[in-house]
Amino acid sequence: MSLIYVLNGPNLNLLGKRQPHIYGRETLADVEVNCRLVALKFGHDVRFHQSNREYEIIDWIHEAREDAAGIVINPAAFTHTSVAILDALNAFDPPVIEVHISNVHKRETFRHHSFVSHRADGVIAGLGIEGYQLAIRRMASLITLPT
Ligand code: DQA
């Protein structure tokens, strides 16, 4: 059994209440249940976190260096601003998959650039919260692939 970190950035605690026409009506608790179910199907475990504070996300990425087989991350607004999160991910060797609930490329131009994409092995955007399940599924493949 391997451990997959699922990290969520600012305002995602309001998922389900915040701009439901963009992000849907399901909550972050629903996302967590879905991630756990898919991971379990592949025999893996999930450590699930959300924070509105950049340093907490960085600390979890550092922690993941010790015990994670991969990171699925929706950095939310930090996607577009945080060189610090990119640097932390660059210090993490296993696979990284970036997830966005909305299609950031269809939205404002400031959402079109992602610092995290410079490191991510894969990016999912615009598939709603299903994107997380697909990311876990892909992570499970990457974990079992011979290196
Ligand atoms: C988001 C897209 C970001 O641009 C935005 O700041 C978010 C959520 C998404 O999941 O679609 O907070 O990462």
Image (cartoon, rainbow, N blue to C red):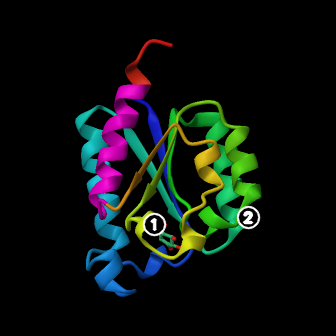
Residue 46 x/y as whole percent:
41, 46
Q: Dots 2 and 1: beta carbons under 8 Å?
A: no
Instruction: Answer above or below: position of 101 versus 67.
Output: below
The residue under label 1 is: 104
Residue 133 is left or right of residue 13, and the answer is left
Say what amino acid the circle numbered 1 marks.
Val
- In magenta stretch: residue 129: yes
- The answer to which of marks 2 and 1 sits earlier in the sequence is 2
Taking depth in this image into account, of 102 and 69 the one nearest to the observer is: 102
**SS class, disc 1:** helix
> Which residues, given as a range, are shown in magenta?
127-142
Q: At x 60% / y 72%, what residue is drawn?
A: 110
| Main secondary structure of the magenta stretch | helix
Q: At x 31% / y 63%, what residue is drawn?
A: 129
Distance in Å between CA atoms under marks 2 and 1: 24 Å
Residue 40 visible (yes or no): yes
- In magenta stretch: residue 29: no
Residue 16 visible (yes or no): no
Q: At x 34% / y 76%, what residue is drawn?
A: 23
Q: Is mark 1 within 8 Å of ligand 1?
A: yes
